Image: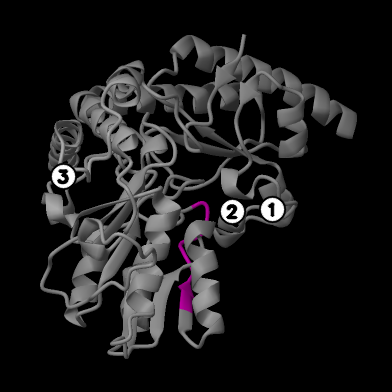
Amino acid sequence: MAIYLDNQASTQMAPEVIEAMIPMMDVHYANPGSTTHRAGRLVGELVEDAFQRIAGFFNASVDEIVVTSGATESNNLALFGIAMHPKQKRRSIVSLITEHRALLDPLARLEKVGFEIIRLPVIQNGHPDAGMVELDRLANALSENTALVSVMLANNEIGTVQPIREIAKLCHRFDIPLHTDASQAVGRIPMDVQSLGADLLSFSAHKFYGPKGIGGLIVRQTSTPFVLQPQILGGGQQSNLRSGTLNSLGIVGMAKALDLCHQGMDSEMASQKQMRNSLWLLLNERIPGLQLNGPIWDDRMDANRLPNNLNVCFPKVDGQSLMLALPDLAVSSGSACTSAEPHPSHVLLGIGLTIDQARSSLRFGLGRYTTLSEIQTAAEWLSGAHAKLAAFAA
């Protein structure tokens, strides 16, 4: 029996998504840009319908959607597209120390070419808002020289949901565009770009039960002045913002995945929150000294943490050793993009954990197909393995 609790890294593709994609491989395989024949026009119509549904999910317009290979490319397009535009005169960018590497690495490159990168700290662990940026501190970092603010909507390790609406209001006072990486939030919490206020929003389909290798960047038509410099040149597709033949297979799959998320949002949020809470309680009963990493919740308050996220520090044991002791339990010690690195999580260090505490922590990401029985079994496995490792360490 294998149990998958790593849905923050990637999700199982929904069977309905696979079913929707199959005709795009064996029947509707023409290039959607080939409008001179019927086969191409038909695929173009299917892609246009998918774009309409994707835009509808976000409450955006079709011409605000730029399809990419995923959030990493979308982040690069947002950051380099704004910062490196020939007309860009502002030379400062504001972000957080707890952002994903898909944002931190492009920021580091921009820093090397002369941009001032302001990386703000976040509220420390033990506070109900752990991982959240302090709005006063953010406001003080903004100026007329700020080219862009980029803040992740929901953190991929500790689940903190940032106050993006309030951040957007602060940014727009200075006509500063706001970018948010919403990879972990799309499909898990309600999503309305009009209400959210961000000018650019990145997402990846494989985080919400869609195919890998497809995602998007919403480039909103707002009053905030900004222009993107394309990063991929070629055929001029997607209004020249991202050239290349449209991934019709992935676009149709992504649209279907978003349809399913829209239909089941409320029930999935409630179910995953209940199972997340059960896992925490079961582990707490069995393992003395367990520590919660990230925002604290109770029955009255849970709006500042993803409903499917749990990050826990296990006392007296190394997280990697605990994972190795349970090969049939899929969990992680942090972002999948940094799992091969020996360094402790920069997110956990950023909220005040020690190096030892960060190395003793594991992330649990529940999903649509997680069951309560799996949660109960996982708690038994973890408590048993922890007891053996802790006894050995003593």
Q: Is residue 278 magenta?
A: no
Q: Nearer the viewer, residue 25 or 388?
A: 25
Circle nearer the viewer, 1 or 3: 3
Residue, disc 3 = 55
Residues at marks 1 and 3, CA–CA distance in whole angstroms = 38 Å
Packing grade of label 3 (10 A; few <14, some 14-19, many >=20) is many
Residue 289 vertical placement versus 23 (above, below): below
Q: Is residue 394 visible?
A: no
What segment carries the magenta color? 118-126
The image's mark for residue 348 is 2
Which comes before the other along the chain, label 1 or label 3?
3
Q: Is residue 41 visible?
A: yes
Q: Nearer the viewer, residue 10 or 25?
A: 25
Q: Is residue 387 left or right of residue 134?
A: right
Name the quadrant of the C terminus: top right
Q: Secondary structure at mark 1?
A: loop
Q: Secondary structure at mark 3?
A: helix
Q: Marks 2 and 1: CB-CB under 8 Å?
A: yes
Q: Residue at x 45, y 29 (%)?
A: 11
The image's mark for residue 344 is 1
Q: Is residue 3 left or right of residue 20?
A: right
Packing grade of label 2 (10 A; few <14, some 14-19, many >=20) is many
Which comes before the other along the chain, label 2 or label 3?
3
